[in-house]
Image: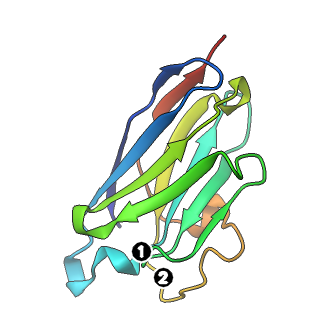
Amino acid sequence: QLQLVESGGGLVQPGGSLRLSCAASGFTLGGFTLRSYPIGWFRQAPEHEREAVACISGNGVGTNYADSVKGRFAISRDNAKNTTYLQMNILKPEDSAVYYCAAVRSPYPDFCRVLPRHWRYDSWGQGTQVTVFS
């Protein structure tokens, strides 16, 4: 399992932007690189289930998004920096939640073809709070 640490959450007004980061470590055991790990972003608001937001393949080519964030959020990764990002634009109050990044080692380049649910991942960060208030 990886160690994942999210950062970048905070308070923002509707229409604003935030960029979340997810720093990964612990993936070199067994000779693996971070390219072996698709990364997902999830969010969970109080009294709601954990919701998949975005996914990016290990090489960064394949991405997928929840319908609720398409056109507003963008996932990217810099494997040289061991970091994955979630750029969030045109934020809405309903985007308020704790945001988590997650990872799993997978040999499948199309891992993100259908937005994976939370049980597909086995490594999780501690989360970062995003609050959109008017």
**How far across and how far down the image is residue 109, in percent?**
53, 86
Tell me what residue is drawn at x 53 percent, y 28 percent: 130
* Residue at numbered disc 1: 37
- Whether residue 89 can be seen here: yes
Q: Amino acid at mark 1?
A: Tyr
Specify the quadrant of the image occupied by residue 127. Answer: top left
Q: Relative to the observer, which residue lies in front, 34 or 118?
A: 34
Q: Which element carries disc 2, helix, strand or loop?
A: loop
> Do the residues bearing badges 2 and 1 touch, measured as CB atoms within 8 Å?
yes
Tell me what residue is drawn at x 60 percent, y 48 percent: 73
| Disc marking residue 108 | none
Specify the quadrant of the image occupied by residue 110. Answer: bottom right
26 horizontally vs 122: left or right:
left
79 horizontally vs 120: left or right:
left
- Whether residue 127 can be seen here: no
Cα–Cα span, label 2 and label 1: 6 Å
Tell me what residue is drawn at x 46 percent, y 60 percent: 76
**How far across and how far down the image is residue 20, in percent?**
43, 42
Q: Amino acid at mark 2?
A: Ser
